[in-house]
Image (cartoon, coloured by chain):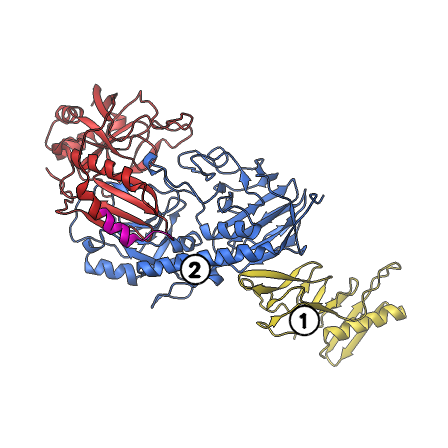
Chain colours: A red, B yellow, C blue
Amino acid sequence: MNSGVIVLAEPRVSLCGSAALLLDAEGPLALPTQERIWRLSGEVRQWDGVVDVQPGMNSLLVVLDPLDADPALLSARLLEVWPTIEAGRIASRLLEVGVVYGGEGGQDLPALAAYHRLDIGAVVALHAAPEYVVFAPGVSPGFGYLFGLDQRLFTPRHKVPVMRPVGGRVAIGGGQANLGSPRMEGGPAMQPTGWHAIGRAPALPVPFDLSKREPNLLSLGDRIRFRIDRIER
Amino acid sequence: MILAADDIARLVEHMRRSGVAEIEIADGDDALRLALPETGDAVPAPVAPTVVTATACGVFLPGHPAREPKAPIGSPVEAGEVVAVLALGPLLQPVVAPHAGMLARLLCPAGQRVDFGTPLFELVPHPQSPEFVKRKDV
Amino acid sequence: MIEILDTPPLNSVQDLGRLGFRCHGMGRSGAMDRVALQAANALLGNDETAAGIEFQLFPAVLRFHAGTVFALTGADCAARLDGHPLPPWWAMEAKAGQELVLSPPQHGLRSYLAVQGGIDVPPVFGSRSTQMRDGFGGLAGRALCAGDRLAAMPAPPCATRDRAGYGALPASFALAAPVHETAGEGEIVLRVIAAAEYEQFDEASRASLWNMPWKVTSQSNRQGYRLAGSALQRTELLEMRSHGIVPGVIQVPPSGQPIIQLADGNSAGGYPKIGVVIEADLWRIAQAAPGNILRFVACTLEEARAAEREIATYLAKLRRLAGYCRLPIMEKAA
């Protein structure tokens, strides 16, 4: 069942306030499009008036200097340059992550399986089959948003956020999958989310470590493979 | 009976000079009692009210634009307290009470551009710890 | 050189935030009321990037262990230095040993303390701002507590020309407030630029955005402000792809009640955006308390830029004029 994701026929650049632009790429969510987004972001980062760039899922947020940048001009320039950027594979590493599906960390798994009229084993197999690509940074430092979720598992997010355990959370939201960071020492045990928690990765490396010179464990374009360690029913 | 602050100050000074410790003034139903404590080595208060002048130039704003009351006349002030500001663009420069007392009068309209030395307030010194006893409320 | 003697939670070291690290999922953080912090630094002649202390909860008491000129802006917290009252938005000298007491503001919500040179804590990714949600930056990635001691960056010693100090016209007086045709007294008007999903909202919802009052709920903090009001609905309920967002983005989750993402908010999200509060008005949100009413008014890019320039002009003038109120000294006063 498709949850009806927005698909644009043409790329669009919109104002995100007075000091940022958002480029939404055309077409369905795809890896070659994201390769072009990564390339574009590297180029745009150098433009005058740009203070930061952030890839999204087939989108690019461009943060501008509110005084010196001309959003209208930069908007036009983005739309001009975007079609000329080509796709191309980038070097990437693979991280394998062991997952305990279901149980306390995956309490949304039974409902999600029922929603798709699949049994739990089938859902787990579909989830663990692909290699997921780290497409974009997430809501905070972590593993980021992942691409590669099987279409048959697309599930609309909860209308009202629910409290779910924090720490290596394996979740599905809309047409996306993600992997939550390990729980922070002294941090909350539960947090509200609209995503469906289907499992937990108990032995997870830290995705972001400030003490390292290169703090990100994974870069955009790297891949994650989920390994089925156990299914708790 | 209506007594201005200057009148009270002058009365107190008279009391001090003449060694009178306590006086009561009655006028029909109104009464005012002034009592000075017996302190042999008290420092005499200045005789006349002090004129507080501008020590910078700017637009005279009594009190502070972001606080009430806008014209703090009649309220007691501490020595060193900022009783008004002189605005120069977005900069606010202090007008400071040189000693404790009460702001008796505005000597300059609020909003007027002033220069160094412009008289701004009349500051009446607090007499040495008097007890001002108000008459019964009506 | 500053010792926190007493503080409630949620007060922290903040500067103007981290720019350039969204690739790591790092949002800007930084002072919620950037204008107030910048004004405090301008009063002292500090670098624009100097860190100060953001006070969200009161009362707070601190002691100066070394003489310095300090500035206090933002919400009027009836500050007293060794018992002597300070005007709001004021800079003055503190001597070693003096205590500063900040009381709960009657208007506004957040106050900012700057000291000469700025607060000295190790920068993380170029900023001394505290990211309390993720636990880094500022003082050990956390809010301040009693007993904390904060040093100041070295700065040439100076005194104030007038012992009573000097101050700034507060931003709410110096900067023209946006106008809303039907806003009531005390309601906070914010300029908003329509966002990518604006057209997806039905006509009634778009009208509500601009015409209805929006109440700040108690679930409002540095991460974002949750508002209560008419339910906003889209004509088509389509899932969005996650994308980068900035402070000021007004998201509309399925409940229909808008959330304004702010300094410590998520740097990405998947909810539809109906509009974005302009950068120049974010400080007005920072001074809005739960229970206050917000109103949104449409704004063009030109109007937004003009508002930015107005702030920049105010701060530049303040910085220049404040320089005349300080005197460099050869030796630090005792």
- Across and down, in percent, residue C239 comes to 18, 43
What residue is pinned by disc 1? B118
Read off the chain for label 2: C
- Other-residue count near label 2 (Cα within 10 Å), few / some / many at <14 / 14–19 / ≥20: some
Q: Are marks 2 and 1 on the same chain?
A: no
Residue for point 26% across, 53% down: C195
Residue for point 75% across, 74% down: B6
The boundaries of the magenta stretch are A68-78
- Other-residue count near label 1 (Cα within 10 Å), few / some / many at <14 / 14–19 / ≥20: some
Residue B41 at least partly seen: yes
Q: Which picture quadrant has residue C302?
A: bottom left
Q: Amino acid at mark 1?
A: Thr
Q: Amino acid at mark 2?
A: Glu
- Across and down, in percent, residue A97 comes to 25, 21
Read off the chain for label 1: B
Residue nearer the viewer, C235 or A91: A91
Residue nearer the viewer, A230 or B122: B122
Residue C59 at least partly seen: no
Does A211 lie within the magenta span?
Answer: no
What residue is pinned by disc 2? C310
What secondary structure predominates along the stretch shown in magenta? helix
